[in-house]
Amino acid sequence: MIEIYIPLLVGFILKLTKVFSNDDAKTLINFVIYLSLPALSFKTSSTIPLSAQSIKIAICAWASISLCILTSYAFAKLMHLEKSDERSFIAVSSFGNTAFLGFPLTISLFGEKALPYAVIYDSLGSFLMVSTLGILLLSGKPNLKNVLLFPPFIGFALGLILRPFELYPHLNYIAEFLISPLMPTVLFALGLSLELKPVSAKLLALALSIKMLLSPLYAIIIASALDLPPLALKVCVLESSMPTMLTASALILKFGHNYQLAISSSAVGITLWLIILLLL
């Protein structure tokens, strides 16, 4: 997973050498939001299996994320954070990197048989939550129109509508083609936005504690109450412990909030997981 750091580092270096600028980062983020993410949400919602167990896994994701939002909101109020910092803090504390980091970790720790649970958690859970609650939180406008017109949500809805119809192979190819640059593009854009500014260690530590310690605790309680099978429960707990979601970081950058906190939370969280893997 060291490859995650390469686009970040290259983006930062190319900004320092003035090949790219901060404005280029916003253009790249718009590419992701208007093309790659809708393609990803369309493909997953049109193909993901729907069952009672799938709904339970989604409920586990929704509930644990909602509890993280409430917990981080309470801490934000206690610390009297400014609105922009408050929204960033809540986002980085609540939405996890359940796909790009969660999928390979699931396979590494539990094997290929566990991957479908991780895909359901990500697609019906965390991705759907960031596309709805996340966009409402970061836009600062509690308006349903913001959600309904959010391109990834439109892609998700179209995928559900077209589920009964067989997707032609070339349509799947187009979706895959648009999805493939998503991760390096987001990381490169975040690298372009990276500045050597100090980030509050207290805020960062608290955000990671909520996301990587409290969130899996919430997931254990909820998954147990839902009577999920042991493997599904383990995957839900693992996914809930993932550090900050790259999509959430991209949205924080798009809406002009504290993206330094978002970048630091993602980078430090991924580094912590790399250390954990080395110790296992």
Image (cartoon, rainbow, N blue to C red):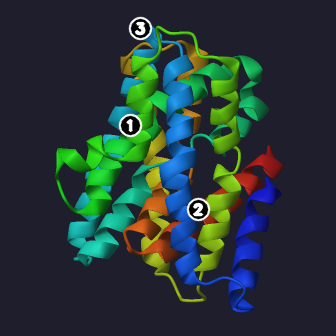
According to the picture, the residue beneath numbered tag 1 turns out to be 154
Q: Position of residue 7 (x, y in %)?
A: 74, 66
Residue 266 disc label: 2
Which three-letter amino acid code belongs to the residue tagged 3? Answer: Ala
Tell me if residue 81 can be seen. Answer: yes
Give x and y (percent) for residue 77.
21, 68
- The image quadrant of residue 155 is top left
Q: Residue 218, can we see it?
A: no
Q: Sequence order check: which comes first, mark 2 or mark 1? A: 1
**Which structural element holds mark 3?**
helix
Answer few, some or many: residues within 10 Å of disc 2's Cα (few below 14, many 20 plus, some between 14 and 19).
Answer: many
Q: Is residue 143 above or below residue 108?
A: below
Label of residue 212 in the image: none
Q: Residue drawn at (38%, 16%), measured in percent from left and top?
A: 226
**Residue 19, percent across and down?**
72, 86
Q: Residue at x 73, y 38 (%)?
A: 104
- Residue 80 figure quarter: bottom left
Q: Amino acid at mark 2?
A: Ser
- Given contact means CB atoms under 8 Å apart, are the residues at marks 2 and 1 in contact? no
Describe the element under mark 1 as helix, strand or loop: helix
User: Which numbered marker is on residue 52?
Assistant: 3
Question: Is 113 situated above or below 204?
Answer: above
